[in-house]
Structure formats: structure tokens, C-alpha cells
Image: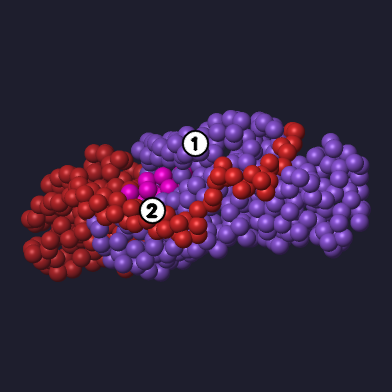
Amino acid sequence: MSGFRPPPERTHQVAAATTVRRPPSNARLIGLVVGGLALITALAVVLGLALAGQRAVAGTPTQLTPTTVKPSGEPVGLARGVVIHLSPGWQVKESQSGTVVLTDADNNLIVFAAETDVVPETRVVELVEGAFRGASQVRFEPTGPITGRDGFPSASAAGEGSVTGGGGSGRVTVRAAVVRRDSDAVGFSGVLITPTRRYSESVNGQFTQMLNTGYVNLQQS
Amino acid sequence: MECPQCAARLPEVAHFCHRCGRDMRTADLARQRSFAVKPDEAVASFALISSVMPRGIARPRTYRAALLIAVGAALVAALLGLLPVAVLLAALGVPLVYIVYVYDVNLWEDEPIWVSALAFLLTGVLGAALLVAVRTWGPEPTLEQLPVAGGPSVVGFLTAALLVPVLGEIVRQIGPLILASRPRFDDLMDGLTFGIISGVAYSAADTIVRHWSEITGGLVVPVDPLTWIPLIFLEGLVKPLLIGTATGIACAEFAGLGTGYDGFTLRYLRGLVEAIGANVAFGAAMYLLGFVTQPALRVGLQLVCGAVILAILIIRVRTVLHVGLMEAALEHAARRGVGTSVPVGATGDLQVCRRCEMPLLSDAEFCTACGTAVQVWLGHGQR
């Protein structure tokens, strides 16, 4: 500690003078806080109403083009003979009852699920909307229209949205596809979830490639 | 009677020595049971108001009520699903109470624009810029925090637990240090308060940036109360006080007591390391606990973790204040000489204790009636 500041100079004589600042009352302080909170509330309402309409333009879905190229990569079985071959860099994170969850080194995410009785009315758009439905700790708000291309044997959809969890929030791109075998309506769905900033055609290409391996296996089994 | 510690002469009714602050009625030689700011509290106490608003001890219930109103308003908004309102109230509630406190004690010495601009707005703007930059160019945390997408990543951990806390602390130090280096604001209490203001401003920016999607996601949305109740307490009370207290400790050490500011001393360095350490621990806990799958449990654990770190910081800031005030008193006594000619008793210029309104002895460092350190009121429009 360097030096010392002498005690206050306020004295009884000084206190009697008008130069001494009179502290505000308790009621005034509480009033200021309440008034400030009211202003913040009003600002929040205005912001909430004004910014809620701002929506980003969603991506457009990639039309799947089934191929008959012989699948390569590690095979992963779903159910009912549906087999997906992993693209390089992807690995199985979880696997249970006809559903596999894949991740890559960037923690992008793909969920493949075997489907039965896939009917033409299946709306692939709902896959995008429901991508986070099972994750109760996460809230997904689309930031634009989710566009889809229905039509079998494959259909795809894409959309962007804001994901919010307890640890933060961010924008993600979701792409989904459904593939069906016409003879028995057996098929599978795939959902790619990736941070929008990290989304690339490379990731989408790997997703599409895996979808196609499943399609080929489905037709040949 | 005579003080056995510094030999100062005291009236028989004195509870505390007006020179060295010793408690004359107990054997508590180090005065650990009588916090120099508020002697009816122990130094090792979790009392919030006397720790973060030391000049507000004359009306602690008012400030306690103000904090409860601010947090309560955010809670009500969250439970009603008014998330933009809840987030902004949680972000700005504590800063608002703190600005009212600064106004009450006139800490800004009739320079509200300078103090507000440097201690609050500068940190808020710089903090928001830093956090937006990290979110734009740093690793994306959101998808990694989905339980199915895997566990923590090294880059994500280093960003959340090291990069952001260190850069954030640097940002938070700028305004308060500029202020504390000015003659009117170079007191330990000033440094502490400006540091806390800067910290709560940064916390407000962090909350707004972190929950921007809630602000823009619609005025009313359904919410899970079990998640949002602890989240409001975390974002609206624990986080701002934690970050503010940590920054306040370092800034208080920078300002120091006495004439002029102490500057970049070893004490400041230690305070800075403690501030960064607390924020690193908080950032690491928030990041790692973000992988807990159950949302209410996750936020609850984050709240508990933040509260524990805050409690440690409260003890630390009280120690910094107490030691600073006691040391200043001893230094003053040593300079003036102990047990010598300073008269005991009232003089023509009778000073009064701002807390208990009892007369102060000449050149007293402590009120002999309630034990409050006179230094508590310095810089309060009385220089």
C-alpha cells in the first residue's frame, strides 16, 4: 500500500451546509431499478417482434441420383437387409434397432434409419423438421422454408435452422433423404446435420454417396 | 484504556481500536470475525452485498431487494415463454442494479458519462465484438454439444476454457484500469467497483450473444421450466457476479489504498491470475457440463459449479478488502506513531460514522462504536 488518504473531512458543520450530497431514498433506488427493468422489457418486446421475422434463405435440396456403382467402404447393416457403406472419414457413433449414427472428424452428424412401409406420401420435409425432435435438450427453429423434392425411389429435402441448447446456440444445415424399394416399400432414411458455416459440398457428397450405397444394396438384396 | 496491539489510548466504551481496528472485546486478534467493511460479519462469509457493493452496507436490504426484483422479473418472463424479455432481463438486470448502486454512492464523482463509458460501455462493446468474432471464426460448438455427435473436442475445449477467458479478462481490464489510474478514481473501493461493473457488462454481452437465437426466435415460445429456472439464475445472477468479482479483485489490487494507484504490482499480477483462473475454471465447467444430455440436469450442474466458483471469489474479494483496509490502518498508525500525542476525544471538527452516525475520534481509522473502517467512505464525494 502506498501512502494513506486522510479520513473524510465531513464534519457536523459541513454536514449542515448544502454542499453535502443527500443520498437518494430507498424508494427512489428501487424505483430506478423497476423503471430500468421496464425499459429493458419494452426494448426486448420491440426486438423480439422486429427480429423474429428475419429468416435466412434455406439451402436447396440435392436431387438424389441413384447409381449402380458397386459400393465400397465398411458396410453397416441397418435392418431388413438394408446396408450402408461408410464413406472415408466417417465412423459409427451409435447403433441400435435399425438406426445408426455416424460422425466424422469435424463432428458432423448423419443418422440412417431403416424404414418399413415407406409410402409415396412420406414427406421428406418432415425429416428435416423432426431432425431434433428426439433430442429433448435441443430446440430447433427453422430459419427459412424447408424445401424438398418428393419422388421415389428417392426424395430429399434441405433446410437451415437455429439450434439452441443449454450450452449455446448456432445455425445448422439439415439435409434429409428417403429411399424406397418399390417391391415391398422397404427403405431407409438419412439425415445429415452440419453447422452451416462448416457445410460443404464435400460433406454433402459423402452423404449422397452413402445414400447411394444403401440404394444399390437395397435394389440388389 | 490502551490498545494492547498499537498502544493507542481509547475510551472505555470503545469496541474497536480506532488506530489498528483491533476488536477490544474479544480475543479475535486478527479480527477475522469482524469484516472491516461490515464488522458484524466475519471475513470468511458469503454475504453478497457487503462484498460486491461495499459502500452500500448502509442499506443492504435495498440492494438485496433490487437484485431479487431483477432476477425475479427475468424468471417470470422465462416462465411465460417471453424469451427475448427473459434473456435481456437476465443480461442487463445485474448491470442495472450496479449502475443504480454507483449512482447511489456517487462513485462516479459526478462524472457519470466518463465512468459509464469506460467501465460499462467500452467493455460491453469490446466483449460483444470478441464473442461474435470467436463464434464466427472459432470452432462451432453447437453441433458438438449434441450428445449423439460425440464428446468434447480439444479445439472446442481450448477455445471455451482458455482462449475466451484469457482474452475476455484482458478486455475487461482496459476500462477499469484507465479509470483507476485517474486521481479521482484511484482508491481500492473504486478499483473493485469499476472491475465489477466491467465484468457484469461483459457478462451481459456474453448472454446476449450466446442467446441471440432466443431473442430473435419469436416473442413467445414454449419453454421447459426445469431448464429455464436454473438458466436464469446462472445467466442473470451467478455469471455476472462471478465474472465481475473476478475482474474486481484484479482491479482493486491495481488501484490499492492510499494516495495514487498502486499500478502493475505483484499484487495486481496475482489478482489478474486469480481472475483468469476463475474464468478458466468456469469456462471449462460450462463446456464440459454442456455434454450432459438431460437439459435440466445440465443447467443445474452448471449453476452449482458457477455458484461454487462465485463463493470462492466472494471469500477472496472480502479478504482483499479486509486486508487492504487493515493494512492501511496499520500503516497510518505507524506513520503517525503509536501511543503518542494524538488526542482521544471529540474536537472542533467532529466527524461522524456514515454507518452508525456515531462521532469518530480524531484521525480515526475505525468507528469505535460499530467498527466500520473509515476508508469505506473515502472517495464518496468527500475528498
Dot 1, crowdedness within 10 Å: few (<14), some or many (≥20)? few
Q: Is residue B267 left or right of residue B21?
A: left
Residue picked out by circle 1: B111
Residue at position x 86%, y 45% from top? B343
Q: Is residue B45 left or right of residue B32?
A: left
- Nearest the eye: B364 or A58: B364
* Foreground label between 2 and 1: 1
Q: How many marks?
A: 2
Q: Quadrant of the N terminus of chain A?
A: top right
* Secondary structure state at the residue bearing disc 1: loop
- Nearest the eye: B288 or B230: B230
Chain the render paints purple = B
Residue picked out by circle 2: A36
First to last magenta residue range: B202-213
Q: Quadrant of the C terminus of chain A?
A: bottom left
Q: Is residue A209 visible?
A: no
Depicted A209 relative to depicted B222: above or below: above
Q: Is residue B232 visible?
A: yes
Question: Which chain does the numbered disc 2 sit on?
Answer: A
Q: Is residue B208 magenta?
A: yes
Residue at position x 40%, y 69% from top? B226
Shade of chain A as shown in the rendered figure: red
Tell me, yes or no, whether the two marked residues, 2 and 1, touch with CB atoms within 8 Å.
no
- Nearest the eye: A4 or A64: A4
Q: Give the x, y percent position of residue A84.
A: 27, 54
Residue at position x 9%, y 55% from top? A150
Residue B247: image quadrant is top right
Amino acid marked by disc 1: Glu
Amino acid marked by disc 2: Gly
